[in-house]
Amino acid sequence: MFWRFVLGAVKYRRRRLLLAFSGLAVAATLATALFSVYSDIDRKMRREFRGYGANLVIAPAGNSQTVPLRAVAEAERLGAVAAPFLYTIGRIGDERVVVEGIDFRRAAPLTAYWQVTGAHTAAPGECLVGSSVAAHFHVNVGQSLPLASGFCPVRGIVTTGGDEDNRVMIPFDRAAADAPFHDAASVIEVRADGQRINETRAALARALPETDVRILHAIAETEANVVLKVKAAVFSLALVIFAITTLCVTGNFSALVIERSKEIGVLKAIGAAEGKIAALFLSESLVLALASTVAGYAAGLAVAYGIARRIFSDTASVRAIGVDFAVFAPVMAVTLLVAVIATLFAASRIWCIEPAVILRGE
Amino acid sequence: MFLRFVGQSIRRAPRRKAMAIGAVALGSAVATAMLGAMLDIGDRVNRELRNLGANLLVTPKSASLPVDIGGIRYQPLAKDEFIPLAGVPKIRSIFWQLNITGVAPSLHAQTQIDGRDVPVEGVWFRRDLQAPDGTHSAAGVRAMNSTWKVDGNWIDDRVANDRAADCIVGAALARRLGLHSGSTLALFGEHFSVTGILSTGGDEEDRVFVRLEVLERLTGRTGQADAIEVGALTEPEDAFARKDPSKMQPEEYDRWYCTPYITSIAHQIQEVLPMAVARPIRRVADNEGQVLSRVRGLMLLIALAALATAALTVWSVMATTVLERRYEIAIMEATGAGSGLIAALLGAEVAMQGAIGGLIGAVAGAQLSGAVSQTVFGIHGETPAALVPLVVVVAIAVSLAGAAQPLRRALSLEPAEILREGA
């Protein structure tokens, strides 16, 4: 009998139920999309900040002028990206120029902001030059720069707006071979996970007591602030969206109850308790909510994928984009909650229905 | 008669009308809050990103190549290469002057301490800068770098004093020399007291900072600056921004010039300071654009989702109101009212509900958006005044659109059918 009532509702009120179903499905879709985006927003936003390059530097401390190279391995062991840099003064003709030794392979993630014409790396014997150097000595990509330590073919021209514009960049090993010290660098730049930056700094400082490990405050703090604020904004938006979808669904369910006033009247007239009638409506809406959770989950994942794909990523792989399949449980909880709240609001009318009045047709 | 019908309809079922108005109000509140606070989030994040420091560096046009590592110069600069300090206020007279958030001129020198070369920078710490048009703004390194921390006290250089013997020492240098705030330090043969120890994590930690006018006196370079750091709020660079301005058509050039791209701001600075080159600091400028466009895109999509939901809600509530009154419509039709009249009557009612709800919602939404900016960003947000009427108009339009379909259906059905069904 109970289920006949529920199934009957599906059969005879298809239009109405479709409206309620779509309302709930929209709620589930938005919940899925927002949960999925929100759960991963931290990682996604922090990834955007990787472009800023290093957020830690390991610099010489005390009277030392260099940092031991083992610091690189130490930082990599802690899961960070690290690259050594070595500065020397070279000569071109009778002019002096700063020559920077870079481990191109390791430094690549830290120098993503460089604007390079030509190649991004140079093999031993080759070099990259800063844009001011290129202009000053009138060299172009493919030509050769007359460094006193030997001619080197220019593979690329680097523009950063910073010190690199005035420098010549050669492979680290090549620069280290000419340096008056061994297994050491002038400075080591490190990009640590923004969330664990303080732990990473402490661990490095413990492992390398002879160096000065510093957090680049400007980068680390701005990253933390922006990530926090974007998260808070997304969260408050999500709350507002839930409030409004609940309202939308409540409207739909109220209409459902109003339309069926006559049936409710009949049920009450033949002696059904209000609680039981409300339970009927509740189970009906729960069935609807379950169905719309599934539909909304699928649609929401697609939306989340679309958002992430459009905004955060240049690849199409689901894993890289970070669509979170684990949001099903919270989505179902939210959808059921919305359905229950909406039904309870709507069902409060059941108590007000007077069978005699309704059945007379007023 | 017309007005009586509408008035009575509201008097007869105030609760139902209140619910519809409430729904419209909530929908419009969300719409206003979204548009007011959230689309604005880009600007907020932009300001937040400005904490990273300067994104433009202005240096003198130079015939020689600077040879310096970590602020220590290995080749002296030519004597006639400098930016006159008198030119600094001009930076705040360019087309995009309101987008300039900070200006910090500096003079560089080096001195021997304990047998090692130490870079000394003369800077404005926090100075009031008067632009040529008379507006005032804060300039100097403190305004530019809000993440710099000083253990001790900053130097208060609001009033220029070239005899003041105070300095700020970078933390790494202070550790090496065993200095702390209150110590004294000999620079260029004069004694300076250390007021604070600066930690930034960067190269600045290996330097000594003194007042700009003090270093001018010590180096005999009155009225000169070696570099000006500029912070500017910019628009993320797109393909158009990367075009070479010298090859643009006149109208393209105008568009480029009138968009706050980092390159067009650099160009405008070079126009007012012809002896200098202004270069975007790519590390800051490019990433700023990147992060900003991501955040804006994200907020826009979420705001669109919210707006769509709000519209859907208003739509469905209005559809329900009309659906509930099919019976009345049928009776009116049966007693001889024309379709046009009925549509006008109900339309007026729906529009009125939309207008009242929209107005309440828009005003409440403006408050809400203010509260959100206050809690999330700590800034009092301003909702543009044009938003309120816009939201009201949209609320009315969406309400009418929601009511249209069920109304058309009710009018197309035979009154007898509806009445029989309702009985």
Image: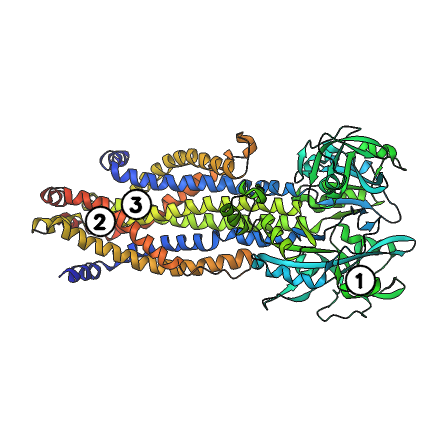
Alpha carbons under labels 3 and 1: distance apart: 78 Å
Q: Quadrant location of residue B384?
A: bottom left
Q: Mark 1 and 2 residues: CB-CB less than 8 Å, in contact?
A: no
Please state, as top left, top right, bottom left or bottom right, where the N terminus of chain A lies in the image.
Answer: top left
Q: Which of the pair A140/A118 is nearer the observer? A: A140
Observer-side mark, 1 or 2, equals 1
Q: Does any portion of residue B272 appear in the rendered image?
A: yes
x then y, percent, for residue A236: 48, 51
Output the chain of dot 3.
A
Q: Is residue B339 above or below residue B134?
A: above
Labels 1 and 2 in the same subunit: yes
Q: Residue at x 37, y 39 (%)?
A: A25
Task: Report crowding for label 1: few under 14, some 14 to 19, many 20 or more residues within 10 A (C-alpha).
Answer: some
Mark 1 lies on residue: B221
Alpha carbons under labels 1 and 2: distance apart: 81 Å
Output the chain of dot 1.
B
Q: Residue at x 34, y 42 (%)?
A: A23
Q: Does any portion of residue A275 appear in the rendered image?
A: no
Q: Amino acid at mark 3?
A: Asn
What color scheme is it? Answer: rainbow
Label 2 residue SS: helix
Q: How many marks?
A: 3
Q: Is residue A170 above or below residue A255?
A: above
Mark 3 lies on residue: A252
Observer-side mark, 2 or 3, equals 2
Task: Report crowding for label 3: few under 14, some 14 to 19, many 20 or more residues within 10 A (C-alpha).
Answer: many
x then y, percent, for residue A112: 66, 38
Q: Residue at x 41, y 61 (%)?
A: B385
Mark 2 lies on residue: B322
Q: Amino acid at mark 1?
A: Arg
Relative to B396, is B274 on the left or the right?
right
Q: Which of the pair B316/B79 is nearer the observer? A: B79
